[in-house]
């Protein structure tokens, strides 16, 4: 069985750690590889960070126009290897092939956006801000930047950070999720071909010990984290206590409001795609669907019919619309949460527990599930389920729905489905969430915009992607100059 290597200083190297954990296909339980994880991975972190620190001195001096050239090559290589990378994502993460291809498309868009760094890094200049004095701002890179990524988008999330960090002149160390390390292993195989100097990008495998080593390393200047809220808070606090710049994106519990004037057919299809896409394992998955006013059960019926027909199975099969959840523990956790909902008074309108998927009896499958009559005080209303479970609520007015939404501890996304512009406008203004969808089920910002989580969905101030990424990966230097006329030499 292959034991994954780290990529440090332009070479694949064995980890100093010999303890490993299995990388498992969640649909079949096949062990795909073994990944180092344990107490000696901090030594690997040390190797990667010292190579990155050494490389920084030269890389920061390369003109930005030249720094983005390898990114153009990376875009081309990612496109050429799209099919193989999509297969890898599906095999280690479980999502369907179409979802894997979609995720890679979003990764490539971030590479394209970062190629605008020569323009985005331009800064401000005020001539004669005081008599004979000019003032201007320079953006300079920070140094070694680290990224810690989650399991649910192995091919995309590192790209919210990596291309921007290196385009801005930083060097970069990635620790992918130990549950899905194979996709980045392949991506780094491509990165090795794009002409970056040794040490500019590294890949270090591992779990908690590796994360802690990055958070404590004095030469790591900035940390980008994406994962659950509990760990995001921890990473933010520990990284900041060590004097680092930190951006930490956390979990979510996303509400969707359906008004009586919504287009039923479109809304049901789009909402079901949001809830059940990637088996509900998306930080922008809709979770709670709130029908407003008297709809006589129409949206409930439409959602039920759409959910019931969704085909669940191995993501590599073309007819499959939903894959498994990531681990056996995740499956048990989701099923326990459904049971908890029932014990709190919910009715299971559609029960996806313990399905039999022919040929894949050992997979971590749960079919689409719908809960209704869930009490607002229930745990299931507040907890991120991260599985294919929709909770139906009904409320009398838009204001009541907004009040419920604005009591949410998270704030990643809120969506509204309506044909009324005025109601949509009120909602987008008053909903307490960083990404708003109007007749959109997954309000995922494109690469040119920041991924704007609020509340406990984000710790920090500058988000991933777009201009925020450029600001996060640079520090500003203000220069004030006086050049009196009298000093001018006469030539
Ligand atoms: P996770 O928090 O378990 O793991 C994320 C990373 O943290 C991994 O690399 C892991 O190795 C590391 N980690 C885990 N436990 C740790 C510990 N005790 N100490 C230090 N590091 C630790 O998250 P996950 O299960 O991989 O991903 C799912 C979560 O990520 C969900 O909550 C989801 O909402 C969230 N997510 C958020 C966004 C967003 O943009 N806000 C995007 C994707 C996923």
Image (cartoon, grey):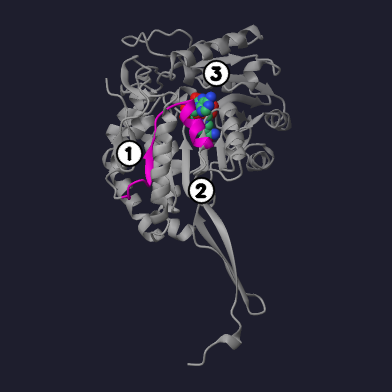
Front position among marks 1 and 3: 1
Highlighted range, magenta: 196-216
Q: Earlier in the sequence, mark 1 or mark 3?
A: 1
SS at circle 2: helix
Whether disc 2's CB lies below 8 Å from ligand 1 is answered: no
**Mark 2 residue crowding within 10 angstroms, few (<14) / some (14–19) / many (20+):** many
Q: Nearer the viewer, residue 316 or 165?
A: 165
Task: Classify mark 1: helix, strand or loop.
Answer: helix
Judge by depth and name the residue closer to the eye, 72 or 298.
Answer: 72
Quadrant in which the N terminus appears: top left
- Label 1: which residue? 188
Q: Is residue 83 visible?
A: yes
Q: Which residue is mark 2?
A: 469
- Residue 417, quarter of picture: top right
User: Does the closest atom of ligand 1 sit within 8 Å of the Cβ of label 1?
Assistant: no
Query: Label 3 belongs to which residue?
Result: 301
Q: Earlier in the sequence, mark 1 or mark 2?
A: 1
Q: CB atoms at circles 3 and 2 under 8 Å apart?
A: no
Judge by depth and name the residue closer to the eye, 128 or 54: 54
């Amino acid at each position: 069985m292959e034991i994954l290597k780290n990529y440090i200083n332009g070479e694949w190297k064995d980890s100093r750690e010999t303890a490993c954990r299995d990388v498992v296909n969640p649909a079949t339980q096949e062990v795909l590889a073994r990944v180092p994880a344990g107490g000696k991975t901090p030594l690997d972190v040390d190797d990667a960070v010292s190579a990155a620190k050494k490389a920084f001195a030269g890389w920061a001096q390369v003109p930005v126009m030249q720094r983005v050239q390898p990114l153009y090559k990376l875009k081309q290589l990612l496109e050429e290897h799209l099919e193989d990378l999509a297969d890898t994502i599906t095999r280690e993460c479980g999502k369907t092939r179409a979802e894997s291809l979609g995720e890679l498309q979003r990764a490539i868009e971030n590479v394209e956006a970062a190629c605008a760094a020569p323009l985005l890094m331009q800064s401000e200049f005020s001539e004669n801000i005081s008599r004979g004095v000019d003032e201007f701002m320079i953006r300079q890179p920070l140094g070694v930047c680290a990224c810690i990524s989650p399991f649910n988008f192995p091919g995309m999330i590192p790209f919210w950070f990596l291309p921007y960090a290196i385009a801005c002149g930083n060097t970069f160390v990635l620790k992918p999720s130990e549950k899905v390390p194979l996709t980045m292993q392949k991506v780094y195989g491509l990165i090795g071909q794009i002409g970056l100097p040794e040490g500019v990008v590294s890949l270090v495998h591992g779990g908690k010990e590796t994360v802690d080593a990055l958070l404590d390393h004095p030469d790591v200047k900035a940390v980008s984290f994406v994962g659950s809220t509990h760990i995001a808070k921890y990473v933010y606090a520990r990284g900041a206590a060590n004097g680092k710049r930190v951006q930490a994106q956390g979990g979510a519990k996303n509400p969707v409001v359906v008004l009586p004037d919504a287009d039923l057919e479109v809304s049901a299809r789009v909402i079901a795609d949001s809830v059940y896409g990637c088996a509900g394992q998306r930080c922008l998955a809709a979770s709670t669907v709130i029908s407003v006013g008297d709809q006589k059960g129409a949206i409930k019926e439409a959602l039920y019919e759409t959910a019931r027909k969704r085909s669940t199975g191995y993501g590599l099969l073309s007819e499959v619309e939903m894959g498994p959840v990531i681990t056996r523990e995740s499956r048990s956790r989701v099923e326990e949460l459904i049971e908890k909902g029932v014990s709190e008074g919910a009715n299971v309108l559609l029960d996806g527990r313990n399905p039999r998927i022919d040929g894949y009896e050992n997979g971590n499958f749960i079919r689409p599930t719908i809960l209704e009559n869930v009490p607002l005080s229930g745990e299931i209303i507040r907890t991120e389920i991260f599985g294919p479970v929709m909770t139906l609520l009904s409320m009398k007015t838009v204001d009541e729905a907004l009040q419920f939404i604005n009591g949410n501890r998270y704030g990643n996304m809120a969506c509204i489905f309506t044909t009324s512009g005025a109601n949509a406008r009120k909602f987008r203004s008053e909903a307490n969430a960083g990404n708003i969808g109007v007749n959109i089920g997954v309000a995922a910002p494109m690469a040119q915009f920041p991924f704007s989580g609020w509340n406990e969905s984000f710790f920090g101030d500058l988000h991933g992607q777009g201009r925020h990424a450029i600001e996060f990966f640079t520090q500003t230097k203000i220069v004030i100059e006086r050049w009196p006329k009298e000093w001018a030499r006469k030539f």
